[in-house]
Image: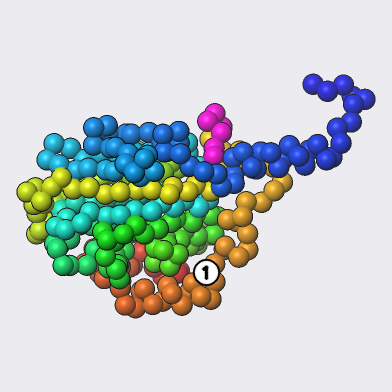
Amino acid sequence: MYPKDVRIPSSIFFIFALFLLLSCCMARSVNFARDFHVTWADSHVTTVDGGSTVELSLDQSSGCGFASRNKFMFGHVSMKIKLISGDSAGTVTAFYLSSETGGVRDEVDFEFLGNRSGQPYTVQTNVYAHGKGDREQRVNLWFDPSKDFHTYSILWNHHHIVFFVDAIPIRVYKNNEARGVLYPNSQPMGVYSTLWNADDWATRGGLEKTNWAAGPFKAYYKDFDIEACATDPVLGTCISSRTVITSWWEAPSYRQLSGVQARAYRWVRLNHMIYDYCKDQARFPVVPKECIVGY
């Protein structure tokens, strides 16, 4: 404890605050070996291209996955993914955030559903808040994501969650807690990726089964970027909350889509959306509240 007659210059407080921000809440080069770990089937996760790219493999013996070593409260996470080529029906390649807290988990999902050769790739998004999910939307991608790497991103702040494909928003989930809609904002979430067999539902509702003769199925990841608040491992809160500096993803310009983004979003929804839970009366005879108040 400092003696009472010692005054610490305000500039020192500023420097310390800036150090905290730079150390935990600003972009830094993400290294897979340092910042991630394999969660299952080590033999199916390898690095290629001199260690710059991570390869996930699925065969009849196992799928696989990896996760970040840290958990975060709010921020922006992205990675470049090259999906399974050829006949990938029945497979699911995923990139998601999750609190991993069982029945009360928060989770934000990108799930890429495999296809028969020549058919469009479908991306399914979902949002869980305090264990409540069933908020699926599906979009057919307007390009072949197995030909090259594309960037998939999640922006998560106090105002909304936005899913991006190559900087084009494909889904917005707004924070409508004030109107009684659950929103994931109380549990830190890690960054996860998995590749597994889900031929009981993934392609045409399970009608198309995995063709194991076409395997092993491989997806590739690179250029990981995490700009987010790492959480205190004891308190479980964002370390940067101790500073007076506001994180960029909470700035006013990130609280809603820009005009350009809004136009691109409408284009996706009009031309490429193939399923929206809000319009599924068979599943939801009573329209979910967030579908009424705006999502």
Q: Quadrant of the C terminus?
A: bottom left
Q: Is residue 256 magenta?
A: no
Name the spot of residue 136 as percent of width and height, x first.
Answer: 31, 60
Residue 182 visible? The answer is no
Residue, far front = 50
Residue at the spot x=34%, y=44% of the render? Answer: 49
The answer to whether residue 232 is left or right of residue 92 is right
Q: Is residue 128 above or below residue 32?
A: below
Q: Is residue 139 above or below residue 27?
A: below
User: Which stretch appears magenta?
Assistant: 230-235
Residue at the spot x=71%, y=42% of the render? Answer: 18
Name the spot of residue 224 as percent of width and height, x first.
Answer: 44, 47
Residue at the spot x=45%, y=42% of the render? Answer: 189
Q: Secondary structure at mark 1?
A: loop
Residue, far right = 5
Name the spot of residue 78 as percent of width and height, x first.
Answer: 44, 52
Residue at numbered disc 1: 257
